[in-house]
Amino acid sequence: MTRLFDDPDRFSEDQLRGFAAVYPEHVTVVPGGVVRSRPQEAGRVAVVVGGGSGHYPAFSGLVGEGLAAGAVVGNIFTSPSARQAESVARAADTGAGVLFSFGNYAGDRMNFGMAQARLRDAGIDTRTVMVTDDVASAPAERRHERRGIAGDFTVFKVAGAAAEEGLDLDGVEAAARRANDRTFSFGIAFDGCTMPGADTPLFTVPEGKMAIGLGIHGEPGVRDADMADAPTIARTLVDRLLEERPEGAGPRVAAILNGLGATKYEELFLVWGHVSDALAEAGLTVVRPEVGELVTSLDMAACSLTLMWLDEDLERRWCASADAPGFRRLPLPKVPDAPRVVSGEQAKAPVVVGDAASRAAAADVLAALRALRTALHEAAEELGRIDAVAGDGDHGRGMTKGVDAAVRAAEEADAAGAGARSLLSAAADAWADQAGGTSGVLWGVALRALAQELGDAGRADGVRAAGGARAALDAVTSLGGAKPGDKTLVDALVPLVDTFTAGVARGTAPRSAFAEAATAATEAADATAALTPRLGRARPLAERSVGTPDAGALSLALCARTVAALLGDGTGTGTGTTTG
């Protein structure tokens, strides 16, 4: 919800004052809105855009070179008055006339229409282009009834560039109409938006659903559908817009994947990856796509896709430079004649083919990694819950990403005939790379240290395994600096290594020694519940952590028990391995 405001009734005026104070080099406040601080040259058409507040960077954020000359700013989701529109237009006019452009809404039509009449009576030639891009709001045969949503931006951008080129009012109007005729948008909402001072959103989306066909004034979608994953949402957006392809349109399009206020940029980038694929499959070439927030709706959780089918003039104006508070476009950098090509293979260490004994040990390692994958996926939700008590709650997700990557890398190395060291090294690097964070790097360094002891030749017996375990502990404590009592995975790793190496040293069979070690690690992990963290994820919220065991210690103990069970039933053993 919108939490920060003074008087809710003055939200629009108050935010506009702060906005202008941030961007004095771009905008100046005038009655009714803002105009460019540095006026256009005399004889340039003034493109004046506008509508209600709550849509930033539309509309005030789009005032600047290459875009609008002024923006009329109404109250939240409310059309500005005719007097406001007239005031901004008069301040922006340089003698070549004014083009009004705004979304097709009843209040805007009436107020801008009245302002246009007053301006014409005063001798200022004024035209209007309403944006009608929302395909969900009316069928194609009633295009004139469609409302304007994120397609506002493409029309404003083209009109502003046409004015910057020096076209007269007829030419700027024609360019804007051409842009509108070839612009189409379709959106999906996941949650509604809340007005300043209100306790409830303007609409809600049922749990497990998404609203198809959003508006930008807090209107619900035209229908609800079951919530879908990102690839399905991307395909839904693309397929609907492909139905609107203008007759005779070429393969080049401008595209905007627009967030409505509460959809994170990372989510939009993820969806864009699928949208880009779908557009390419349809034979379309996307020219300078935009992914981000361009026409928002307060805090609405939603996204929309806009396509504008390009011709030569539209493409030039779409790509033209612009400099406004909410949007900046610079010329594209020169592309090298020979683009750099980087292969992912360059980052991989070479695989050393192992002898028969080491290949057998490698098979055991791969079996263990697969068993860990199953166990960690089953425990991921609980590990995340425990981690969230005093951390960021991502431990379960990180561990599953790490082990998944490790298994893939190990399987690839195994197919190439790798010995135990090469296979486990590849798995270690993949784990660290994909898991990320503290746990990822610690698991990566531990597994790599263990791998170095196993080697790519000879039998990986208990002595080698014990030496590898000690090397793993040394690597973890050296890199992370933790020691027993700090409430980290080291609290479980130390008893695991000490018990295992002591057992091997006194002649206990490696399987039995490791089973004892896994029990010791589990008991130590459980005991971390009583500790106050001095290092790691839980330290900033130390007191909250007391009473809950450390997630890193628990996941390490779980992995130890999983490997012990595998060794115990013999399903993961080959000939001449650590289970010897």
Image (cartoon, rainbow, N blue to C red):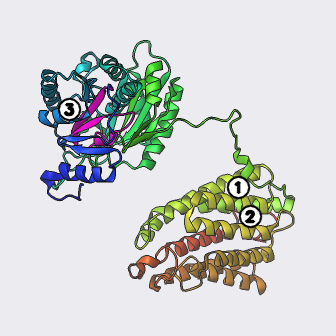
Question: Which class describes the residues within 10 Å of circle 2: few (<14), some (14-19), or many (20+)?
Answer: many
| Residue position for label 3 | 90
- 203 above or below 140? below
| Residue 375 shown in magenta | no
Residue 556: x percent and y percent? 58, 72
Disc 3 versus disc 1: distance between alpha carbons?
Answer: 70 Å
The quadrant of the picture occupied by the N terminus is bottom left
Report which quarter residue 447 is drawn in: bottom right
Report which quarter residue 573 is drawn in: bottom right
Which residue is located at x 80 percent, y 74 percent? 464
In front: label 1 or label 2: 1
Disc 1 versus disc 2: distance between alpha carbons?
Answer: 16 Å
The quadrant of the picture occupied by the C terminus is bottom right
Left or right of residue 179, residue 337 in this image: right
Magenta stretch in the rendered image: 44-72
Residue 237: x percent and y percent? 39, 32
Residue 280 visible from this viewpoint: yes
The foreground one among 21 and 378 is 21
The amino acid at mark 3 is: Arg
- 251 above or below 65? above
Secondary structure beneath dot 1 equals: helix
What numbered label is drawn on residue 573?
2
Question: Which class describes the residues within 10 Å of circle 3: few (<14), some (14-19), or many (20+)?
Answer: some
Residue 148: x percent and y percent? 27, 30
Q: Earlier in the sequence, mark 1 or mark 2?
A: 1
Secondary structure beneath dot 2 equals: loop
Residue 311 visible from this viewpoint: no
Q: Earlier in the sequence, mark 3 or mark 2?
A: 3
The amino acid at mark 2 is: Thr
| Residue 50 shown in magenta | yes
- 567 above or below 249? below
Question: Which class describes the residues within 10 Å of circle 1: few (<14), some (14-19), or many (20+)?
Answer: many
